[in-house]
Image (cartoon, grey):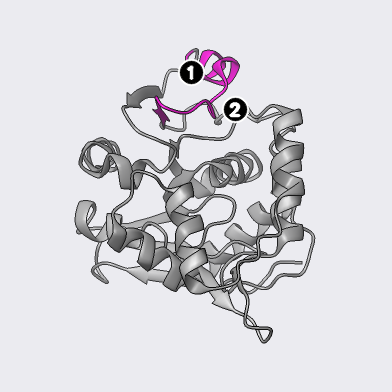
């Protein structure tokens, strides 16, 4: 059963469409400032994944369900196919979408895809999914710790968009901890390769180790595959927006 996802759209109404998929703990507006600055001619559609942002929280939270939800997004937008730009866990969702419906994915840009997650580390992160902070200042401090390369403006914006004060006065990220824990489990499953003939760009953040070498090696045998590395942390759109924007503009055109 597909969820009625919240979709955040930006850019000119008549611009070429692109679907942007956020990663675990994220939300559809996480890349909004980046796409506005670096992809201004594109009509960007960025849904909140199930269990994240303002989307329904109900399970299942499997890759298959997320992919089915994205198919419903494309249907609701009246798009038969679109390029997909996807980050981290969102890249796994995009790969699953391309696997089950290859004709609906025009091309794939995978930003530091989480294809090489160690199960022991995934367990640590899954068990830490529930985050509670006493004050907004504490939430800002947590976001600052997670995004060491981000500007104060970017950190404050992320707290405004993705943290919420509960009835108990405490602050929590705007996601379901159960959905996030499930996502870490899903990241330990075998990763599908892009379909043959689907142009695919993988952009690796050189300061992190999310992209499995086995995935890159397997993709390198595909005719339509290209690869780039940026001097960046996991949040490439924050650490290297200009370089990432240049790569995406060339790829999407």
Residue at 59% from the left image edge and 51% from the top image edge: 24
Crowding at mark 2 (Cα within 10 Å: few <14, some 14-19, many 20+): some
Crowding at mark 1 (Cα within 10 Å: few <14, some 14-19, many 20+): some
SS of the residue under disc 2: loop
Residue at 39% from the left image edge and 44% from the top image edge: 148
Residue 47 in the image: state x and y as whole percent: 51, 64
Which of the two labelled residues, at mark 1 and mark 2, occupies the earlier sequence position? 2
Residue designated by label 1: 222
The numbered mark at residue 82 is: none
Looking at the picture, does residue 160 appear above or below residue 91?
below
Residue at 66% from the left image edge and 30% from the top image edge: 191
Tag 1–tag 2 contact (CB < 8 Å): yes
Q: In which quarter of the image is residue 251?
A: top left
Residue 207 in the image: state x and y as whole percent: 41, 27
Q: Quadrant of the C terminus?
A: top left
Looking at the picture, does residue 44 appear above or below residue 124?
below
SS of the residue under disc 1: loop
The numbered mark at residue 193 is: 2
Residue 113 in the image: state x and y as whole percent: 52, 35
Query: Is residue 111 located in the magenta-colored stretch of the structure?
Result: no
């Amino acid at each position: 059963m597909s969820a009625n996802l919240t979709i955040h759209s930006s850019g000119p109404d008549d611009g070429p469409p692109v679907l942007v998929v956020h990663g675990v703990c994220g939300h559809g507006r996480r890349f909004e400032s980046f796409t506005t600055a670096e992809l201004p001619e594109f009509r960007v559609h960025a849904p909140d994944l199930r269990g994240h942002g303002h989307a329904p929280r109900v399970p299942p939270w499997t890759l298959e369900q997320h992919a089915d939800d994205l198919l419903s997004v494309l249907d609701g937008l009246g798009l038969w196919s679109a390029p997909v730009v996807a980050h981290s866990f969102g890249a796994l969702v995009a790969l699953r979408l391309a696997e089950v419906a290859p004709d609906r994915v025009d091309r794939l840009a995978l930003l530091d895809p989480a294809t090489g997650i160690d199960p022991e580390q995934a367990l640590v992160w899954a068990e830490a999914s529930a985050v509670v902070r006493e004050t907004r200042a504490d939430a800002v401090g947590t976001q600052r710790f997670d995004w060491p390369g981000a500007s104060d403006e970017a950190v404050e914006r992320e707290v405004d968009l993705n943290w919420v004060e509960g009835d108990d006065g405490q602050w929590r990220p705007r996601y379901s901890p159960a959905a996030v824990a499930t996502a870490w489990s899903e990241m330990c499953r075998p990763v599908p390769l892009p379909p043959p003939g689907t142009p695919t760009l993988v952009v690796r953040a050189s300061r992190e180790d999310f992209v499995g070498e086995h995935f890159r090696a397997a993709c390198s045998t595909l005719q339509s595959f290209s690869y780039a590395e940026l001097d960046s942390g996991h949040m490439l759109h924050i650490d290297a927006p200009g370089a990432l924007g240049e790569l995406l503009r060339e790829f999407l055109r």
